[in-house]
Amino acid sequence: MTTPAGPPPLPVLGNLIDFGRDPLGFLDRVTQQYGCGVKICIESERDTYIVTDPAQVEEVLVNTGRTFQKGYQRHPLMRLVLGNGLVTSEGEFWLRQRRR
């Protein structure tokens, strides 16, 4: 498996400035430029991957979802901003929310 391409990150800040200025516009631009699998850096501790191809989304969310971690449980600020919904939750709690 190869690592997807993505916009070059700035030192320390990664792609946070561009993402922060216009999150949806940034995501639209990078998927238009780099395709359906994009690697971005909006947190210094980890890379973030954008998957837009329906078959790949199903693979990540349904077939292999247990092997991926979102990691928001470690970041109280992100949970405060994003809440405790499908985006931030994991494991059995996420599965119960998804089935609602």
Image (cartoon, rainbow, N blue to C red):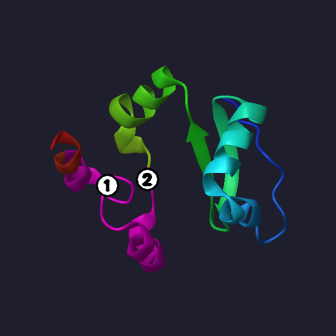
Task: Give amino acid for label 2.
Answer: Gln
The numbered mark, 2 or 1, whose residue comes first in the sequence reads 2
Which three-letter amino acid code belongs to the residue tagged 1? Glu
- Kindly identify the residue that appears in the image at 34 percent across and 68 percent down: 83
Q: Position of residue 22 (x, y in %)?
A: 67, 58
- Left or right of 81, for residue 20: right
In the image, 66 versus 20, the foreground residue is: 20
Relative to 23, does residue 43 appear above or below in the rendering? below
Does residue 50 sit above or below 35 in this rendering? Answer: below
Q: Residue 76 in the image: state x and y as whole percent.
A: 42, 78
Query: Is 19 on the left-hand or right-hand side of 62?
Result: right
Residue nearest the observer in this picture, 80 or 64: 80
Is residue 78 highlighted in magenta? yes
- Figure disc tally: 2
Residue 20 place in picture, x, y as percent? 67, 65
Q: Residue at x 84, y 68 (%)?
A: 11
Residue 92 highlighted magenta (yes or no): yes
Quadrant of the image containing the N terminus? top right
Cα distance between the residues tagged 2 and 1 = 7 Å
Contact (Cβ within 8 Å) of mark 2 with mark 1: yes
Q: Position of residue 53 (x, y in %)?
A: 54, 25
How many C-alpha atoms fall within 10 Å of the one at disc 1: few (<14), some, or many (≥20)? Answer: many
Residue marked by disc 1: 90
- Mark 2 crowd level (few <14, some 14–19, many ≥20, 10 Å Cα): few
Q: Where 97 falls versus 81 (above or below)?
A: above
Which residue is label 2 attached to?
69
Which residue is found at the position 78% from the left and 72% from the top?
Answer: 12
Q: Quadrant of residue 37?
A: top right
Secondary structure beneath dot 1 equals loop
Q: Nearer the viewer, residue 83 or 9?
A: 83
The region drawn magenta spans 69-95
